[in-house]
Image: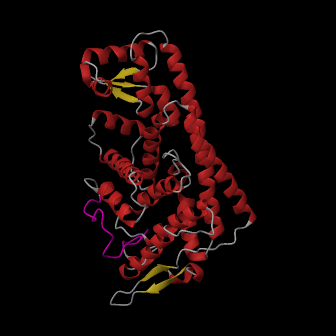
Amino acid sequence: MDPTKFVATDWGRAVSTGGGAPYYAFVPATVPKHLTLRPETIMLLSEADASLGRLAGSGRLLPDPHLLVNAYITREAVASSRIEGTQASVTEVFDAAVTGRSTRQDVQEVRNYISALQHGIDRLAGGFPLSLRLMREMHEILLTGVRGQERTPGDFRRSQNWISSPDNRPATARFVPPTVENMQPALDDWEKYLHLSEHKLPMAIRCALLHYQFETIHPFLDGNGRIGRLFIILYLMNERRLPAPLLYISNYFEQHKSEYYDRLQHLRERGEIHEWLEFFLRAIHVQAMDSVARAELLADLRESYRTALKGRRSRAIEVADLLFANPVITVRAVQDRLAVSQPGAANLLRTLSDAGIVHRIGEGSGTRHRWVAKSILEILDPSTG
């Protein structure tokens, strides 16, 4: 790491490690409790706040708001994992969730992300605080049974890590997080800031600062980016700005991946705090409005399903509702969710097929078939169209 690039001493400093093979590591300053925001940042903050408010209220578009949650979590998980190089589609993840089968490691990594986020949501709902301990619990779930599992799931690192080195050495890396010795004080400050009872800065600004600081500390040997992005969703829920994980902010970060990394790095090196905050606030605004738009489309689609099934004396409408949580479904899943027989579940799916709501894919017979609601998938992930 080139220490001459780190000129913004208010945000940290590059420190030589000494020893036989010395290199420089970055020691971040404490998370700031006060900032003077420029007009452009304040304008974007207002837009982000308003968009979050609209998203928080979008649940009223559906009689059962929880129907959106699993689909939105899946989209967030796919996008966040893609930033780290994982290649799995939304459809593949939905398919694996309903069948319980996937031979692709990438799909399992995304499913672990979903499990980690759900664990965090459940813990918060049970009164457990958003904390470093919870981050470690989610990290263990994220890395267990996949690539990187040898990198101490659930434990903070006990050795140096680094980012973007052409020859896998810290001396040539673009960025080297704090040494283990300096990491723990930085984590302690991060958690104290998280739990401050009084704040001088708006919630979205604090979220941006905490995400930046976590990524800068980089406390795990692997999975820091994904855990740091999981934190954003949990923080918004913990601060009562979202009732459910309906914001898939990683989609914006994936689409602007180079800028995402550059904004974090330029804050460390040059102190470009306004640029980072504005990028982060723009991401919240764009993705919140995108989530609202898709919720409206899904609400309209649900009504069209109910119209198509109107007058049928069956539980087909209940099956149609299940599709909004997972647009890929099986006979077995219908049996389990509605407590009906195998022939009854198959008949319900045929009813939806006759109405043009689903179509059957897969080889074999009986419960091995999958039924897909393509219209829902196209709203959640336009690339499937």
Q: Is 167 contained in the magenta span?
A: yes
User: Is residue 385 visible to the viewer in this orientation of the structure?
Assistant: no
* Pick the front one: 385 or 292: 292
Taking the image as shown, residue 42 lies to the left or right of residue 333, namely right
Residue furthest right as drawn = 39
Task: Please give the name of the residue rendered at 31% of the width and 18% of the height, measured from the top-left corner.
Answer: 345
Task: Please give the name of the residue rendered at 27% of the width and 65% of the height, measured from the top-left corner.
Answer: 152
Count all numbered tags in the image, as a single digit.
Answer: 0
* Residue 88: percent from left, percent from top: 39, 44
Task: Please give the name of the residue rendered at 45% of the width and 38% of the height, measured from the top-left corner.
Answer: 71
User: Is residue 321 visible to the viewer in this orientation of the structure?
Assistant: yes
Taking the image as shown, residue 147 lies to the left or right of residue 256, namely left
Residue furthest bottom as drawn = 19
The answer to which image quadrant residue 139 occupies is bottom left
The answer to which image quadrant residue 104 occupies is top left
* Residue 140: percent from left, percent from top: 30, 59
* Residue 369: percent from left, percent from top: 29, 23
The answer to which image quadrant residue 124 occupies is bottom left
In this rendering, the answer to whether 272 lies above or below 280 is below
Q: Is 9 contained in the magenta span?
A: no
Structure colour scheme: secondary structure
Write the start and end of the magenta stretch as one range.
148-168
* Pick the front one: 240 or 11: 240
Query: Which SS type dominates the magenta stretch?
Result: loop
* Residue 134: percent from left, percent from top: 37, 61
